[in-house]
Image (cartoon, rainbow, N blue to C red):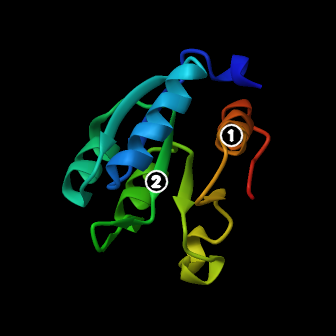
């Protein structure tokens, strides 16, 4: 599963330091190239609009601000992303209801499986 992620550039948008570090370690272990972690909305928007990334991992809540503008920017650039969140599906706006989600707390294989399916083009909604 992780072979498909070798060399994939992943943007991490997460404001909780320990969670961001955990995700970064998981992705590096899988052979990804990590961009970030980016902890704040303004920085995340800048990265979403300028970074050359293959896929992104987005926390929904960044220090009290929704990350949906980041998701919109990534969508405009056709960059696939997964939401990593403790929120239920009822917190999702309709335009993102079908996007893949990994629920906190999660295991490494859950996140890597979703990213692998996104990169290989086979979906990955959870």
Q: Nearer the viewer, residue 35 or 118?
A: 35
- Up the image or down, 59 lies above or below 30; here it is below
Q: For the view shown, which residue lies furthest in the bottom direction?
A: 90
Q: Quadrant of residue 61?
A: bottom left
**Dot 1 surroundings within 10 Å: few (below 14), some, or many (20 or more)?**
many
| Residue appearing at x 56%, y 21% in the figure | 29
* Tag 1 secondary structure: helix
- Up the image or down, 120 lies above or below 118; here it is above
Which callout, 1 or 2, points to the residue nearer the camera?
2
Q: Quadrant of the C terminus?
A: bottom right
- Up the image or down, 33 lies above or below 125; here it is above
Number of marks drawn: 2
Q: Which mark is residue 54?
A: none
Q: Nearer the viewer, residue 52 or 109?
A: 109
| Residue appearing at x 48%, y 43% in the figure | 56
Q: In this figure, which residue is indicated by the disc labeled 2?
A: 58
Q: For the view shown, which residue lies furthest in the front direction?
A: 18
Q: In this figure, which residue is indicated by the disc labeled 1?
A: 118
Judge left or right: residue 98 versus residue 39: right
- Residue 120 locus on image (x, y percent): 73, 30
Q: Nearer the viewer, residue 14 or 18?
A: 18
* Tag 2 secondary structure: strand
User: Separation of disc 1 and disc 2 at Cα?
Assistant: 14 Å
Judge left or right: residue 110 versus residue 87: right
| Residue appearing at x 21%, y 49% in the figure | 43
| Residue appearing at x 70%, y 43% in the figure | 114
**Dot 2 surroundings within 10 Å: few (below 14), some, or many (20 or more)?**
many
Judge left or right: residue 1 versus residue 16: right
């Amino acid at each position: 599963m992780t072979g498909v992620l070798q060399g994939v550039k992943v943007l991490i948008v997460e404001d909780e330091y320990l969670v961001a570090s955990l995700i970064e370690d998981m992705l590096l272990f899988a052979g990804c190239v990590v961009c970030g972690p980016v902890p704040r909305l303004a920085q995340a928007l800048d990265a979403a609009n300028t970074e050359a990334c293959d896929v992104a991992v987005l926390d929904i809540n960044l220090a009290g601000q929704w990350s949906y503008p980041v998701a919109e920017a990534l969508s405009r650039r056709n960059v696939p992303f997964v939401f990593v969140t403790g929120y239920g599906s009822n917190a999702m706006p309709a335009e993102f209801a079908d996007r893949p989600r990994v629920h906190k707390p999660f295991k490494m294989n859950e996140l890597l499986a979703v990213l692998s399916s996104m990169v290989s083009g086979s979906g990955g909604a959870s």
